[in-house]
């Protein structure tokens, strides 16, 4: 068998080894053993919510480790085959090697997910812009887009708070996406999204432009300490308006927290109890205050990429045009797709990948 083919195989094995080292798979293996030990504890399922989170984390780590082990074994087996010096196998080996190199390239993408919070769960809030029903319907379309993408990644989604529109859609909705690298991927959606379409709510079938803001925050882990003075908080309780049975709107389980110095307001109403809603709202407030500090630091370092732009109205990150032509364009990365319907059905991976490559430039 030609040396060039063996060199490609050996080079791929070397790149796999280097990449798994950068991804710290050995550390992940230790974490997996620790989680497995916790899962084998007799009282593991006493706290079902915590047990579910640990099980999901274990499964996602196991899948990542198995993915790389399986790839490495396939390449080593192919190299053994190449050493047999059987020229009749050359074409098949080359074909398999090309497929494995493509597989490696797709896995290598995980090196881009090395931000300090990329592995964390994500807190997503979507706010309709001005425009009433049009914008509220657009906010629901974006929520559905993120839901569909999350389903494709086998991530769990839990609505935390919602304010529905009077006719359709949402004035605002907040939910948590739980899964490994949820924030790393979904941070590409942070910003203002613009939609151009023929309105389904307009009898004259006029073209409308709608806007909605998506906020993406990492769920901070316990080792991140954000100090909040209780005197700076105004905490209100009110009747839950979320989905449910006969008990909905009969107990003051919903919680609204206002951080007076910054004016940040966080509401949560879809957890089972007032204490759970309060704990969740405080956790989200900490994430918002953390992002506020990071944005302040980014403004100070704005010379790195020109003028700093926050996720505010007027700073749209992406446009979706459904009429008179079909186009999705990300204004940061210049990524384009002529199939906006597919994107709105949750095919976000190309947009996420182009964004992650752009921020590493």
Image: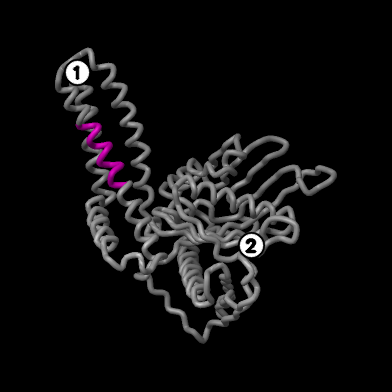
Dot 1 and dot 2 residues touching (CB under 8 Å)? no
The x and y percentages for residue 91 are 28, 16
Residue sitting at x 32%, y 52%? 61
Using the image, tell me which numbered label, if any, was put on residue 172.
Answer: 2
Residue 288 lies, with reference to residue 337, above or below; the image says below
Mark 1 vs mark 2: which is more N-terminal? 1
Q: Toward the viewer: 83 or 129?
A: 83
Q: Is residue 16 left or right of residue 146?
A: left
Label 1 sits on a secondary structure element that is loop
Using the image, tell me which numbered label, if any, was put on residue 128.
Answer: none
The x and y percentages for residue 40 are 26, 61
Residue sitting at x 68%, y 62%? 164
Q: Which residue is mark 1?
A: 2
Residue 167 lies, with reference to residue 68, above or below; the image says below
Residue sitting at x 44%, y 64%? 219
Q: Is residue 237 magenta?
A: no
The x and y percentages for residue 111 are 34, 47
């Amino acid at each position: 068998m030609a040396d060039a083919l063996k060199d490609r195989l050996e080079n791929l094995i070397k790149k796999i080894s280097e990449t798994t080292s950068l991804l710290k798979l050995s550390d992940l293996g230790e974490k997996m053993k620790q989680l497995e030990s916790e899962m084998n504890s007799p009282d593991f399922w006493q706290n079902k919510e915590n047990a579910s989170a640990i099980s999901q984390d274990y499964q996602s780590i196991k899948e990542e480790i198995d993915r790389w082990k399986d790839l490495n074994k396939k390449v080593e087996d192919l190299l053994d085959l190449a050493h047999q010096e059987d020229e009749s196998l050359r074409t098949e080996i080359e074909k398999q090697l090309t497929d494995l190199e493509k597989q490696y390239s797709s896995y290598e993408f995980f090196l881009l997910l090395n931000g300090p919070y990329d592995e964390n769960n994500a807190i997503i809030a979507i706010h309709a812009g001005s425009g009433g029903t049009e914008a509220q319907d657009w906010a629901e379309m974006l929520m559905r887009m993120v839901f569909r993408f999350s389903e494709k990644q086998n991530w769990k989604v839990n609505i935390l708070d919602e304010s529905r529109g009077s006719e359709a859609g949402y004035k605002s909705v907040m939910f948590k996406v739980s899964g490994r690298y949820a924030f790393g991927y979904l941070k590409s959606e942070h910003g203002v999204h613009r939609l151009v379409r023929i309105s389904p709510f307009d009898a004259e079938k006029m073209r409308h432009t709608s806007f909605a803001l998506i906020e993406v925050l990492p769920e901070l882990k316990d080792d991140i300490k954000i100090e909040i003075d209780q005197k700076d908080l105004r905490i209100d309780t009110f009747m839950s308006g979320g989905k449910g049975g006969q008990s909905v709107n009969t107990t003051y389980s919903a919680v609204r927290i206002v951080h007076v110095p910054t004016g940040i307001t966080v509401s949560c109403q879809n957890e089972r109890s007032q204490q759970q809603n309060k704990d969740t709202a405080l956790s989200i407030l900490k994430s918002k205050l953390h992002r506020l500090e990071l944005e302040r630091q980014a403004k100070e370092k704005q010379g790195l990429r020109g003028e700093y732009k926050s996720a505010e109205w007027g700073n749209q990150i992406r446009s979706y045009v459904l009429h008179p032509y079909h186009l999705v364009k990300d204004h940061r990365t210049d990524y384009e797709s002529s199939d906006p319907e597919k994107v709105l059905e949750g095919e976000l991976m190309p947009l996420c990948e182009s964004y992650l490559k752009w921020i590493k430039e």
